[in-house]
Image (cartoon, grey):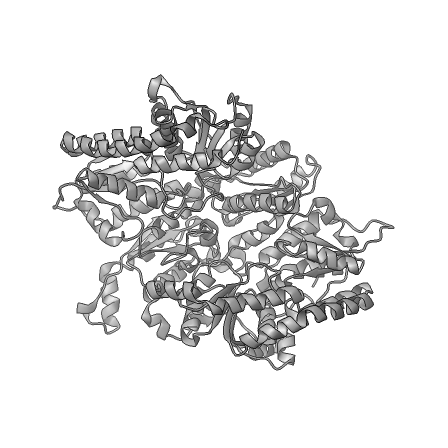
Amino acid sequence: MAKLLDKQRYKCALGAMQTVQAITRAIPILHSGPGCAQKLSDGTGSSGYFSPNIFPCTSINEKDVVFGGVKKLHSTIENALKVIDADLYVVLTGCIPEIVGDDSEEVVSQFDKAEQLESFENEGGDPDKFVYKPVIYASTAGFKGNNYKGHEQIIDAIIGQYLKKSDKRQKGLVNIWADVPYQDLFWLGNIREIEKLLSEIGLTPNSIFGYNRGLDNIDKIAQAEFNLIVSPWVCLKNMKKMEKKLGIPYLHYPTLPIGAYETSKFLREIGKFAGIEQEKTEKVIKEHEDYYYYLIERYADLFLENRVINKEFSVVADAQYALGITKFLANDLGLIPAKQFITDDTPKEFRENIKDEFKKLNYNLQADVEFETDSYKIHNEIKAHDYHGYPLILGSYYEKELSEKLKGNYLNISWPVQDKVVFDDFYAGYTGGIRLIEDIYTVAVQRFN
Amino acid sequence: MTINLNNSNVATRENRIGSITGYIGSLSDLAGKSECGTLKGCSRCFSQSSTCLSSCALGQLSAIRDVAIIHHGPAGCSVASAGNYYLNKTMAKKRGVTNDTVYVGTDMNENDTIFGSTDSLREIIIEVNRRYSPKAIFVTSSCATGIIGEDIDSVVDELKDEISVPIVAVHCEGFKSRIWATGFDIADHAVLSSVVQPPREGVSSNKINFKNFYESARPEIMEMFAKFDLEPVFLYCNSTVEELSHMSESLATTCICGTLGNYLGNALEEKYGVPYVRSINQCGITGFETWLREIGKVTGRSEKIESYIEEQRKIYMPQIEEVKKELKGLRAVIGMGPGYTFEVSRVLNELGIEVVWALAWHYDKKYENGDVPPSMKYLLDNGIDFEASVADQQNFEVMNILHKYQPDLYLSRHPGSTVWAIKNGTPAVYVADEYMIFGYKHTLEFAYSILNSIKNRSFEQNLAKRVKLPYTDWWYKQDVGTFLEEAN
């Protein structure tokens, strides 16, 4: 049912065009109104090999609403294959074609390998020189859910329409799945850091997003020993589908590991699941922890001897950061969670498990967490809460003015982001924890009391 | 033009003023065909994404202070609210005022597309009014609500008794028009039909309605107008509902961009007799002087204006002449909305830069009063002609042109365009701020922006050397109009 979305923190399912954009040389083809891509793109960091304003788009008009837009979709795909040099073409449908009932899937099926070869030959092409350009389809009408769901739809399309079960298994090959590119400010850095950590304990990570990853990595997915999903809920349904279709088991690690405590736990659990010698994992952990605590020791005075960082904090973010940051601040830095707010419209079936995770903190601490998409209510709760000193608020840009009014310390870590430019910075892992501390104390040192 | 403020729907630019988005030819051909009425726009069988009219409409309305925008549709439609929140806070702070405008969505889901959700919408409007007590409420549709036939007009009408501030339905279905500028008209229409009041009796005013985007030149224009005993009222960024309600009392309406201000200017003139200043715009020397003189004529202040022009010329003309020496002979391609393309072409000509191809993101065959746009008329009267096309930000066409012409410079006004030029190795100037070429001072600055861009080409050369462009060799060999077909 329609609801009041006050200070919204997510986009619609079609926002998953950014998931496609994050796969190098994959391009979204939009069967949508002319301006959807522009609305759903972010102002900065979008001008890669493809940018949203060059995504092919049927730019549906009034006539297409009345008579259907399948012909336009066909010519758009056909010509996109000629004009745009890509490895993978993903057709995404917006609201209009799904309401008026365009059979977009049928149009896309006209571009399968056999049909592409046939038209290549009909145009006098030499069959030996034929290059197949995969075209797949994802239903991402805006009313079908938000961009977290849309992200899952893209992965689902890849599994369902592109991947095939493999007889080969590559020992130690692990597919990594994490949260939503672009929606997550730190997506690129986080996934690379997780890859790096996995490599260090002897595994071979495989992910499909960002620089130097693309169709080749998608091709490898089916040969993996297992899938690793690092997210409270996003992509969980994709893991189940892969388990069923491709026979790949998965390890679900719900917490984005930030800082030493969680990252060490993370590595131990993966090591155990992958059957890696314990000694090897412990050696990697020790090296990281030694350096991490060398840094912490040097800056411990900063944590203790300042007048502005109070112990109590709130995170206003999607499930991933709300959980990851709460665990980090509680278990690594010894802070006390006030209420935490999860704003990604987490599907109801995952909420209890996520709530349980907030209860697993050191010293039997339990964080109170609320799933809420109405920011008016969130802001009222923050205002009403006594933080027993300056609050520390990690949230979206919407919390900036509120934090200023409460004389709090504020960091912009979740969408929408205006206060920070991030190229490949990250909060995941040991180094990520240090980065987050740097960011928090960069705010703190700008005031005296 | 007859403006019907009793109907919440605005006819699209295509239907109202014969606007088009597909054409290739020359400036003279375009104008000639417009005048004799034979111009017919083409459609494309392949296109790239452009812009939604709702972004323009709601971008305008949500910049008004302390109002509420209620965007009835899926979360993607109202996603612009995030950017507007940032912009409003930032712009208000810059001006030293506060802006508590709220822009909410209704997060429409699949069930709503089947069963409708006007009941929820009604509750949402009431709740937003309770929470924020806005000074006006704009309730807007989306593609999804438009197609399923949500009757937002009735919801709004029924609430008029309950809600004491202006409340109006704003029809923003993105599929209605390929011309996003239709959104500007939609915003004006909403303001005119809900907020603007007839002039109060006995109130005399020295105000001029000044339609712009983000009022960066506000202080200097205030200062200049004060010399003429005129007071500009900048619209709509940081406007108050109170200010808007008295627009009908102003001495005149002017705008920084014909595409932006055309509907409002004509409507205020037609309905309340407020003269609309229809000159070429304020870009460059001729533009600025022509505009100022027109203001002088309309408001009876010609003498003061002439002495201002004389004084300013003495300061700036020698400097502009100096920098022109270094720009002479450069070749440029430009791609902008029609409110700027033909104005900036004129300025480039003034600076001695040759326009080899101009793209307009759309083209209005005639303005609301039936005339060919004055900026075009000026160029043709002065013997300036060049190759021109109309393309709604179709980047593949821009790149095809840049590849073939390899100009010294590309100028564009819309985000996401200049970056492609530099990847082609072409220096680019992003003419984002609407006041970037305003008057003598900014024309001088603009000339230096160009000079600085071509003086040091390191950035684009470094980048262009290392990136591969996303278009196939096949495409670069094609004619730029390959995908245009006769509109049916």
- Residue placed at 48% from the left, 36% from the top? A443
For the residue pair B138 and B61, the one nearer the viewer reads as B61
Say whether residue B351 is visible: no
Q: Quick check: B441 above or below A91? A: below
- Residue placed at 41% from the left, 43% from the top? A183
- Residue placed at 63% from the left, 72% from the top? B320
Q: Which residue, as the protein is rendered here, is positioned at the far bottom?
A: B383
User: In the figure, is residue B27 to the left or right of A182?
Assistant: right
In the rendered image, which quarter is residue A58 located in? bottom left
User: In the figure, is residue B85 to the left or right of A19?
Assistant: right
Q: Which residue, as the protein is rendered here, is positioned at the far right?
A: B202
In the rendered image, which quarter is residue B166 located in? top right
- Residue placed at 43% from the left, 65% from the top? B422
The image position of residue B96, as x and y in percent, is 66, 44
The image position of residue A195, as x and y in percent, is 25, 42
User: In the figure, is residue A225 to the left or right of A156?
Assistant: left
For the residue pair A426 and A299, the one nearer the viewer reads as A299
Q: Quick check: B364 above or below B118? A: below
User: In the figure, is residue B388 to the left or right of B231?
Assistant: left
Q: Which quarter of the rendered picture does the N terminus of chain B lie within?
A: bottom right
Q: Quick check: B195 above or below B409? A: above
